[in-house]
Amino acid sequence: MSTITFTNARLIDPESSEDFIGWLQIAEGHIAARGEGTPPVSDEQTIDCGGQCLGPGIVDIGVKVCEPGERHKESYKSAGLAAAAGGVTTIVTRPDTSPAIDTPESLEFVTRRAQADTPVNVLPMAALTKGREGREMTEIGFLQDAGAVAFTDCDHVVVNTKVFSRALTYAKTCGALVIAHPQEPGLSGGAAATSGKFAALRGLPAVSPMAERMGLDRDITLLEMTGAAYHADQITTARALPALERAKRNGLDITAGTSIHHLTLNEIDVADYRTFFKVKPPLRSEDDRLAVIEAVRTGLIDTISSMHTPQDEESKRLPFEEAASGAVALETLLPAALRLYHAEQLDLPSLFRAMALNPAKRLGLNSGRLAIGAPADLVLFDPDVPFVLDRFTLKSKSQNTPFDGQRLQGKVTATYVAGEEVYRRT
Amino acid sequence: MSFAHRHLLGIEHLSQSDITAILDLAEKYVDLNRRSAKHSDVLSGLTQINMFFENSTRTQASFELAGKRLGADVMNMAMQASSIKKGETLIDTAMTLNAMHPDLLVVRHPHSGAVDLLAQKVNCAVLNAGDGRHEHPTQALLDALTIRRAKGRLHRLNIAICGDVAHSRVARSNLILLGKMENRIRLIGPPTLVPAQFAEFGAEIYDDMSEGLREVDVVMMLRLQRERMDGGFIPSEREYYHRYGLDAAKLALAKPKAIVMHPGPMNRGVEIDGTLADDINRSVIQEQVEMGVAVRMAAMELLARNLTEAA
């Protein structure tokens, strides 16, 4: 593998929270050297970044690739192209396919498909319970041996606390990370919006934001019982934050993520029943959105995910209550996150801490950093270039993005995985 | 008189003058409907299709009669029995009907927003005959006409809307319309059926019916929508009737000439006392039905005028 030196780059280092003009050299698929200003003269290949930003590639926990089952919505090939175009160098895939990834055999299928077709790193997650039905735990040990990096039933809450506590206990002995969706399913059943004036006006069945806090409170109690390693997939409401803060202060092994949509959109964006804005949990109030941004800034919320969920046109061209939930976001994650940077709510090192460093750390990966010796998974991007998103230009097989037609600022110029260029904007 | 709307999807989109325009025109049709020769030809040559994805007797009959009296060719489609059962999507059904060139499409659907969605896909005028728990604009308009005729005005009245507000599109449309016309609105019911968020629309909320009915000019009762309830909203119908059912004793707290309204169909002995509902001195429930036909004639005429202007 060749040696490349990136010069005249604005390096975004989430570990040191630094953001400076410098250079970075990669060799043998890893970061070999870096520094401020101009590099020592070398006859190796150099790439002049022209002052653009160079950050660690994004590590995205919770990407849905629709193999097996619904390959027409998203395949490993299309997801890989979308990820590369979005500066996402590691996708951590969800097991909520059909059937669910709940056996070592099905996990091996996924791994094989991913290796054959995907230019970025793919790390699969497996279901925590068989069929994501919340009754019996999966073969956590075998699945780990087969490469599962975390265990989750995705948006299915394990309702039976006895089953969940046993799964947590077993996962702890295996050293496995459990990812859960904090929600009280009795309250949230049938809901299509967050309760409040907007849902009342539109006549939509709604769930109180308190359902998220109740789910989180329950899970935290079970963590106190079991001591397992736990990550909340999406914290989206202000009322859940004090519980999270307390659990961290008490030394529980807990981290939390949020989705890019909950950071950049609110319930009012649904407007006249626009189903591309239907996500799970539903979009929240503006107060909640601002509280969650602040929690990312302080580090209380650890990670930002795309929660990439492809849906075909038929699943979305339905009355709001009947329409499927979810939005594609691999390619819009970075431009949407840059809205927070341009609004001066988060600086670039903080964004990359949440999008690269923290998710990598949580999964025990050495990536997500610009440190010497780390994998040369990198994203080169221009944070300022403005554009209007046309969803039909997306590389995903499904184009259900809420950002269609919206003004965004910031585009990926090139993406590198283990030192190899996997995407360059033309 | 201008009415610059392509569809009638909800009261939310109407201005004060739009509302007045519909009601003024409807007055003329009230007179026409009381004659023995009830025919007009303002919709002559136009095709009206009634698509009801949810059971309805009175609303569908009212729209059908309104269209026929105006000379339209009216077709009723009971959607529950047809293609929806075969897996066709709402939009496909709409596109199929659209290809038959209707001029007016009257739609009722069990999901909020479904009629808005459909209206985006067709070339004709769409009238919302009720979508989920969102809006039922012609019901609010016929209620407004009934009130205006009974009270002589449609502003500065104290109006109580009682019962199952949460599941009611009638309540939402009325709340918006009566608010736009500058009335004071009270919502009365158990907190499980009258969510606190409605206070943000400028309504006063009461969980004590006796307190809420004090000095009101209009008492609007809502049907308890048992078919939309998926969990215990009330302990029992008899307790509900005791606390929130309208009877003569509770009505005595309202103004002496307060009128009683109900959008129908009524659950006698659940939300309203049967004798009271039939009391012609207080109840205007039959007038509401009569105004319904007139208001729908007026709304369809106004939309049809825009169709011919656009053509």
Image (cartoon, rainbow, N blue to C red):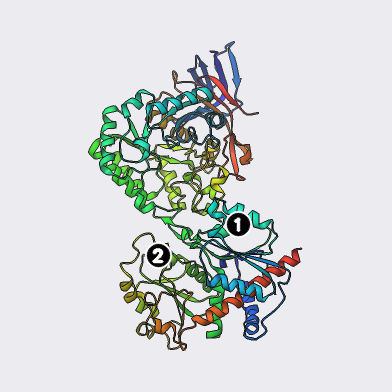
What is the number of callouts on the image? 2
Q: Residue furthest left?
A: A225
Where residue A106 sits, quadrant-wise, is: top left
Q: Which mark is residue B196?
A: 2
Q: Are marks 1 and 2 on the same chain?
A: yes
Where residue A401 sits, quadrant-wise, is: top right
Q: Residue furthest top?
A: A43
**What is the chain letter for disc 1?**
B
Horizontal and vertical percent for residue A390?
A: 63, 41
Q: Which residue is mark 1?
A: B118
Q: In 3D space, how far apart are the residues under numbered discs 1 and 2 (Cα atoms)?
A: 31 Å
Horizontal and vertical percent for residue B275?
A: 40, 84
B11 w.r.t. A305: above or below: below
Q: Residues within 10 Å of mark 1 (few under 14, many from 20)?
A: many
**What is the chain letter for disc 2?**
B
The residue under label 2 is which amino acid type?
Ala
B173 w.r.t. A154: above or below: below
A362 w.r.t. B295: above or below: above
User: Regarding mark 1 in the picture, which secondary structure is present there?
Assistant: helix
Task: Give the left or right position of residue A134, taking residue A310 as reference.
Answer: left
Q: Residues within 10 Å of mark 2 (few under 14, many from 20)?
A: some
Mark 1 or mark 2: name the one nearer the start of the chain.
Answer: 1
The residue under label 1 is which amino acid type?
Leu
Task: Give the left or right position of residue B171, taking residue A127 as reference.
Answer: right
- Name which residue lies at 43% across and 50% down: A288
- Quarter holding the C terminus of chain A is top right
Closer to the camera in the image, A423 or B228: B228
Instruction: Answer whether residue A168 is visible to the viewer in this image.
Output: yes
Where residue B102 sits, quadrant-wise, is: bottom right
User: Regarding mark 2 in the picture, which secondary structure is present there?
Assistant: helix
